[in-house]
Image (cartoon, rainbow, N blue to C red):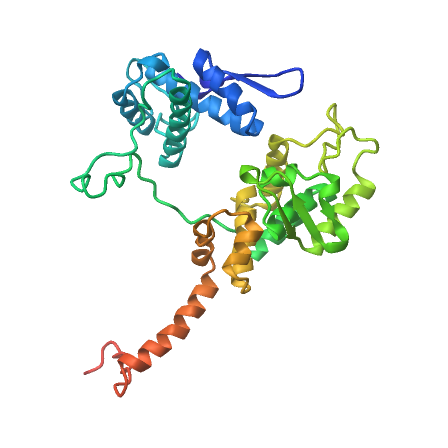
Amino acid sequence: MHAGDLRPVCSRDRSGGLVARVGVPLADVYLEFLGGRCRPHTVRAAAYDLKVFFTVVSKPPEQVQPADVLAFITAQRTGRAGEHGVLQPVDPGREPGGVSGVTVRRRLSIVSGFFAFLQARGDVPANPVPRGLPTRRERSRPRQGVPLVRVTRQLPRILSPAEVDALAAALRTHRDRAMVAAMVLGGLRRCEVLGLRLGDLHAAERRVFITEGKGGRQRLIPVSGRFFTAVAAYLEGERPPGAGSDRVFVVLKGPRRGQPLSVRGVDEILAAARRRAGLEHASCHELRHTCLTRLREAGMALEAVQAQAGHTSIESTRIYLHLADDWLAAQYRKAAEVIDAQVFAGHPARPAAVPGSSR
């Protein structure tokens, strides 16, 4: 079975809301519940993950046991699911393989949320998704078992100043330059850029009001004047007059002219610019990471970077301490000089021996 067979059926209701169906009645009820509290992209992703789960497990929700969940984890990591054969090829041209640990953990979170919903409704007696595997310290630390999926947190990639310049030069419209500037100079997420409305732009204050942040959180943040210059040029010369949406960024050509730009549209614009610039990587998320890293390198307080990024926890922001190489190196050199003076007082370091000498 290939990934294309796992896509849920999605449509729009009369009010324009997303309706997702996966063929499992209780799962469809849960997706309808999510539709009232989450963005369409979140609902679509949850529908896909539930479709994957019930394709592998092949049981109604009431019969799912913890053993089925553990088997699902194995199937995801190996890329195979018993008699179903190949579950998901990583690439169409490559050998079948499993998905990443991050993806498995995300799918388990969706499945666990689904069964928690059923448990609250009284459809199932308990959530079959284990919180973790027990250890010998279970009695003293009952909630600190071994995680079902271990994930190595990798440092995100960022762009160098030369790569940012090359990407900016490859963009063909003021609209595209404004969107990239919002991410690389303001640290906005892709969904936040697409969610901007005309009333959210405070040009006189050089600030932007984020009304559709992650988790529904709002924030008012400063953004470089370069962004507002690009936006002004786009609004004056490119944005279709009489566009039927107050979204800032809309489609400029074709049958959808004047309608809000989609996630796919942004990704296609960035991919084309990346090819023209000869860059191997430059995703929306990398542009955001680049901005937040540079802010930290420039001396911006970690709490200020947290507010700019819209992180609920300072722990999510600490990753930029590791990305800011120059800042970390400077801090280390300063501390190392003090340590060297304290530990090796009166014993100066000897020069390294020259290879081949008699010493």
Looking at this view, is 173 or 217 the one in front?
217
The answer to whether residue 159 is visible is no
Q: Measuring 55% from the left and 62% from the top, which residue is drawn there? A: 300
Residue at image coords 40%, 72%: 333
Tell me: residue 284, above or below residue 334: above
In the rendering, at what x and y percent does residue 41 appear? Answer: 55, 29
Would you identify the image quadrant in which residue 128 lies?
top left
> Measuring 60% from the left and 37% from the top, which residue is drawn there?
191
Q: Quadrant of the N terminus?
A: top left
- Give the number of marks: 0
Residue 211: percent from left, percent from top: 64, 40
- Residue 341 can be seen, yes or no: yes
User: Is 79 left, or right, of 271 in this rendering?
Assistant: left
Give coordinates of residue 225: x percent, y percent: 71, 55
Left or right: 209 in relation to 317: right
Residue 124 vertical position relative to residue 149 in the rendered view, above or below:
above
Residue 308 on image: x %, y %: 58, 52
Q: Is residue 57 left or right of residue 302?
A: left
Q: Residue furthest bottom?
A: 346
When asked about the image quadrant of residue 131, the answer is: top left
Toward the viewer: 12 or 276?
12
The answer to whether residue 118 is above or below residue 198 is above
Give the residue at x 67% y 15%. 14
Relative to residue 314, is residue 354 drawn left or right? left
Q: Quadrant of the C terminus?
A: bottom left
